[in-house]
Amino acid sequence: MIRPRAARAAARAVSSAPWTCAACLSRRGYTAQRPDKVDLPDHRKLGLQQELFITSVYSPGSPIFLPNGARIFNRLVDFLRKQYVRYGFQEVITPTIYKKSLWAKSGHLENYADDMYSVTANTESRQGCCHSAGGEDEADGDYGLKPMNCPGHCLIFKSKLHSYRDLPVRYADFSPLHRNEPSGSLSGLTRVRRFHQDDGHIFCRPRQVEDEIKKTLDFVKSVYNVLRLGVSYRLALSTRPKDHFIGSEDEWGRAEDSLRRALEASGMEWSVNDGDGAFYGPKIDIILKDSDGKEHQTATIQLDFQLPKRFELEYQAPAPELEARGETTEDPALLAEYGPVRPVMIHRAVLGSVERLMALLIESYNGNWPFWLNPRQAIVLTVNTSPPVVGWAEQARDLLVGVQSESSSELAKPTGFAVDVDSTPRPLGSKIREARTNGYSQILVVGERDAESRQVTLGKERLSPVEMLERMRAMTDEFQ
């Protein structure tokens, strides 16, 4: 799932264009003077403050997630995995590198080579005992790091026979992807070289295309509502590029018409980006704005008639000629004839780049994370440092995270919650202020009475760890 070469080149040109015009220079100087402008949230600064991620000169464009950032990342991925059950996706795991012959077959080597990383194996020093050069490993020297998962999913679909009754087949993949973005365009989590995408591919019958696109738009809407992004995104139909596309104009026309009908049926406002489609098909892009008003593509739905043709994908169906056109018949003679039909492939990503969506969420929440996503969900504060108080605070924390059971005979059952303890010898007021500054959702207090009654204090309430755990689970289940 990619942007066309023309769009990538334009973005690079804009990012590197100098201010040379006198009129532009004067405007730039004027707009720079905004003394009363409020500093807008910046995910790069917030990421450091909240200890979410760092970057390194040793791997430019590859963010390093710290424990807090990894918690958010994993919760987003786990949230999507649970939705896959509802929308019928099966998760697969695919290789990070493939031989360049695969990328030649898919068309990426011709249309996307400049943005791919090549991997060359040192085969000369690893010859077999007979120094043979033939066989399966003959061309093992040339590989490419995958920038997307679609060719791998085509290999999976092709690995077994399919009937029309099996379709649609839906695969999902969270494998890391690599794209050779220019160093000048790299920025925090929004423009990176290594990233994860909730990548999915649907192989369906021609008559199922519009229904699958509608379901995917519904998938996007439900997820973005949970993430509190329901009103801040727009839809755009990206059509055939002028250059660097595969397939006939007639195929592109039919694909664009299918997307238009699905957009009309969605009831949402949408626009057209002429010539901004991927090289293999038109697409619907979901576009969000960051705190600066800059737009970022997140989710995408792309229609593809080309990769199934290149990989010779097929399924068996009655009346194959009518099936290929998405038409039906009741004629027994036609239905008695079975034959191969090319499936339609739909590329879809709901979060898009998980890293990019995290950047937008970091700025959108600005430290006020909802409980279910918060990397600092709860903290237990001690009133003093007496052994009974500190001991119970640590035991309460262990019960909330599930590493200790109230019954010593039971196995530990981790809850997945992030709970810390602050037993430092400081005034309670200072600890509470620091916990609020650090963004903890639930601030629990333990004193002498709590230690005696085996409870924790939350505001004006006293709860047992079991009661507190049930409350935290309810908040998570309701995405609070």
Image (spheres, helix red, strand yellow):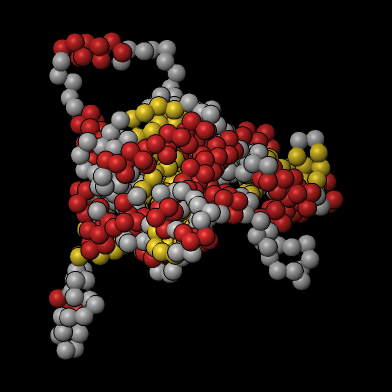
The residue shown at (45%, 18%) is: 38
Please, which residue is most extreme toward the right here? 453
- Give how far across and how far down residue 302 sits, in percent: 39, 44
The residue shown at (26%, 37%) is: 241
Q: Check the image and report above or below for 347 versus 334.
A: above
Residue 436 placement: quadrant:
top right
Q: Check the image and report above or below for 380 versus 332.
A: above
Q: Would residue 30 appear left or right of 227 to someone viewing this image?
A: left
| 190, 393: nearer the viewer | 190
Please, which residue is most extreme toward the bottom here? 130
Q: Would residue 114 appear left or right of 429 to someone viewing this image?
A: left
The residue shown at (70%, 69%) is: 411
Residue 438 placement: quadrant:
top right
Q: Quadrant of the C terminus?
A: top right
Q: Check the image and report above or below for 288 versus 105.
A: above
Q: Is residue 430 visible?
A: no
The residue shown at (39%, 36%) is: 257
Residue 7 placement: quadrant:
top left
- Give how far across and how far down residue 216 sits, in percent: 51, 43
| 362, 420: nearer the viewer | 362
Q: Is residue 109 visible?
A: yes
Q: Would residue 308 appear left or right of 109 to someone viewing this image?
A: right
| 331, 311: nearer the viewer | 331
| 97, 471: nearer the viewer | 97
- Give how far across and how far down residue 137 sits, in percent: 22, 76
- Give how far across and how far down residue 215 sits, in percent: 54, 43
